[in-house]
Image (cartoon, rainbow, N blue to C red):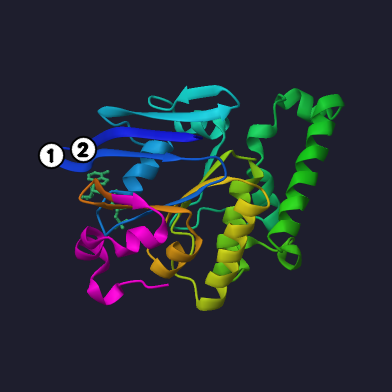
Amino acid sequence: MILTFEDVVLSFSGVTALNGVSFEVGEGELFAVIGPNGAGKTSIFNVLSGVYRPEQGKVRFKAEEDEDVDLLGKRPSQIAKLGIARTFQNIELFSNLTVIDNLMLGRHHHHPYGVLQAFAWFGTARQNELTNRAKVEEIVDFLELEQWRRLPVGLLPYGVQKRVELGRALASEPRLLLLDEPVAGMNLEETEDMARFILDIRDELGLAMVMVEHDMGLVMDLADRIMVIDFGRPIRTGRPREVAADPDVIRAYLGEEHRITS
Ligand SMILES: Nc1ncnc2c1ncn2[C@@H]1O[C@H](COP(=O)(O)OP(=O)(O)OP(=O)(O)O)[C@@H](O)[C@H]1O
């Protein structure tokens, strides 16, 4: 398992956001978390990325082969360095910088040299710069961003901006990717493109992902396993068909009219 989330409890002055949430994510697995508004999905991401510290539970991440790290108490920057990257519900890019420059910023954990060395522009600094540029070009190819590479991100269509944000997360070469509503606000074509890229990330890069998404069709089509939460508690975790057929899930969340038969 690359991630183990065990019996996590988190509350905010009387509101219990997570009430004993446990799940595991395997290497290369696309794991989705769904649930009604306020169920606790964003709170899970905020615990995983070090923004919130739960009062109970364990969160362990396999940062390297045979190296299990306890994530609780770590700062967001430390967690990012360990290999967990995240996209956001609202695009968080520098809109006046180009696609390439935004992707280069995603490499900032890979600049292990100081300012002086960077200015002097020799040895490892130069080598690192070349490596970073090569990695960014790979991502531009992978996410089919060539035609926009030199444009400021703020000028691009919404769906492309979301793709750049995904690229920025990939640029840090994570071992685990957290996708927070990756297709929110997208039209059908943009959604289909994003779905294809998410599948490519799993199938070609072999990257494990945790995805929170309201688009039920997308979740059912893409996820290997799904956890449904309601009021901060998991109702059911399983393969899409199992989850969609679970009477508790249907009652609590999907509603009879959303019964999924695919
Ligand atoms: N910083 C906070 N302060 C107080 N209450 C919070 C905070 N963050 C989350 N909560 C509460 O915790 C519960 C879970 O919220 P969370 O945002 O995790 O749900 P969600 O499933 O992501 O919802 P949505 O689908 O609307 O994004 C809610 O009752 C919410 O009001």
In this image, 115 relative to 75: left or right? right
Residue at point 57% right, 45% down?
A: 28
Residue at label 2?
11
For the C terminus, the image quarter is bottom left
Q: What are the residue bounds of the magenta stretch?
A: 236-262
Task: Give coordinates of residue 31: x percent, y percent.
Answer: 45, 50
Amino acid type assigned to the residue bearing label 1 in the image: Gly
Q: Is residue 241 left or right of residue 163?
A: left
Residue shown at 13%/39% (left/top)? 14
Image position, residue 239 (x, y; %): 41, 55
Residue 213 can be seen in this image: no
**Amino acid type at image mark 2:** Ser
The residue under label 1 is 14
Q: Secondary structure at mark 1?
A: loop
Disc 2 is placed on an element classified as strand
In the image, residue 252 above or below residue 133: below
